Image: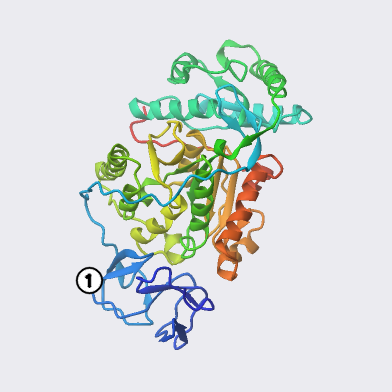
Amino acid sequence: MADQAYILRIDTADNVAVALKPIASGRQIELDGDKLTAVEQIPAGHKIALTSIDQGSAVVKYGHSIGLASSPIKPGQWVHSHNLKTGLSGQVQYRYSPLPAKLENKANAKTFLGFQRADGRVGIRNEIWVIPTVGCINPVAEDLGRTANAQFADRQIDGVYCYPHPYGCSQLGGDLEATQKILAALTKHPNAGGVLVLGLGCENNHLEAFQKILSDYDSDRVRFLNMQDTEDEMADSLAVIAELVDAAEKQKRRPVPLSKLVLGLKCGGSDGYSGITANPLLGEVSDRVIGSGGTALLSEVPEMFGAETILMGRAASETVFDQTVSLINEFKAYFQRYGQPIYENPSPGNMDGGITTLEEKSLGCIRKGGQATVTAVIGYGERVDVTGLNLLNGPGNDMVSTTALAAAGAQMVLFTTGRGTPLGGPVPTVKVASNSSLAAKKRGWIDFNAGRLLEGCAMDVLADELLAHIIAIASGEKRTHNENKNYRQIAIFKDGVTL
């Protein structure tokens, strides 16, 4: 570790370090007994060269190449988009080369208070959800959600919420299937003590078609209403919700083992600190949950590009390795089908925060997955059925990714950010700040501050705190900021023709 006052070298193999605060030109910094002079101003969160790096040579961070020097770089020089470019191009040939497992399962006596559902899954909320089959009825569904939430405010449930979306009609092929699969997975989500699926009657995703996708379901928890079949859709819908509330109130929190917890792992608005504070903190916590027999879901496939071989090396079997290769290559093919560059990332906000190349972003991003073995690969809209670290097919887009994680079965999403975002998904969305400045500035958005890792707090101590915070949220003892503000939304992946 470098002089914590100014810079941090993450791995001994690195030839760059991260500025922990703005560094003025000419400032002398000591690193492991050697002195380094900044030859220009280095913004906080950005990279400073520790050695000379020849043009075309690898710039190394996290112990791996994050790209190639596009011009000669001197010690003490700022390293960013003006002298660093991605080293990624085209498709990659992958070879199965498993690494030794680094995480052992350990018995853990920790429990949380959850709602045991009939299908064996556990919910951490006992909410009533209104899910429209088609976007044209969104205003009615939203009005229904607001009215019901007020009408049943004094009942023993965690609220009534509506999840509008723009799809369900004028869709063809894979797009319609994706819409149906996401909505079906949400309909069966264990955080919902009851669900009213609200249809119109003439849409592609009509109730009869949707029920075929839904297949088996708990009729005590899931009900349907076609608006074109009723004279007063509001009154009839409220009557159905009243029945769902009656049934949901019979569900009570009971102690359940940590192995029943499914965590969704997400990052958005990342900065130069995300990969050294918030993301590895999530990795530490997900390792603890997985080590106790639980599950974590890692998605955002385009933000695995450049770091995918690390995940492939942790595949539980050659079958899982092959599935991971397909996951990566099929997402690259998606970019190519539309004539878009595969490696057109990071975003402008990422760049401002100090992230230069996709390799750098990806190497920081996958740290959310800790050291666990990759036990399964899940398709978009599918639900998790294998414990351990699962890779979930989905884009990096915050809203689409958060929805996909919830649909896959995550009871809560741990969302790291260095820039800040108010976004919340259909499940409790825990915002973890990568830096203390953001945590202080956006107290109404941020639930937990990982920036304390740069202020002397040990990883084990902070991981214990975050896990305790997660258990309190899962048990209903705490609510996230997105819940308190009712910042909840879903978004569905689209790739095709709209009629």
Residue 393 appears in which quarter of the rendering? top left
In-image side of 461 versus 378 (left or right): right
- In the rendered image, residue 24, in percent from the top left (x then y), is placed at 48, 84
In-image side of 15 versus 209 (left or right): left
Nearer to me, 285 or 354: 285
Q: Looking at this view, name the residue that lies furthest to the front.
A: 107
Quick check: can you spot residue 446? no
Nearer to me, 367 or 192: 367
| 10 Å crowding of disc 1: few (<14), some (14-19), many (20+) | some
Quarter of the image for the C terminus: give it: top left
Q: Looking at this view, name the residue that lies furthest to the right.
A: 154
Relative to 367, is 69 above or below?
below
Nearer to me, 494 or 248: 248
- In the rendered image, residue 306, in percent from the top left (x then y), is placed at 31, 55
Quick check: can you spot residue 102? yes
Looking at the rendered structure, the secondary structure element under dot 1 is loop
- In the rendered image, residue 245, in percent from the top left (x then y), is placed at 70, 22
Nearer to me, 100 or 358: 100
Residue kind at label 1, given as amino acid type = Gly
Q: Residue at x 59, y 15 (%)?
A: 219
- In the rendered image, residue 400, in percent from the top left (x then y), is placed at 46, 41
Disc 1: which residue: 56
Relative to 219, is 497 above or below?
below
Relative to 92, is 49 above or below?
below
Instruction: Give the total of numbered labels.
Output: 1
In-image side of 83 versus 24 (left or right): left
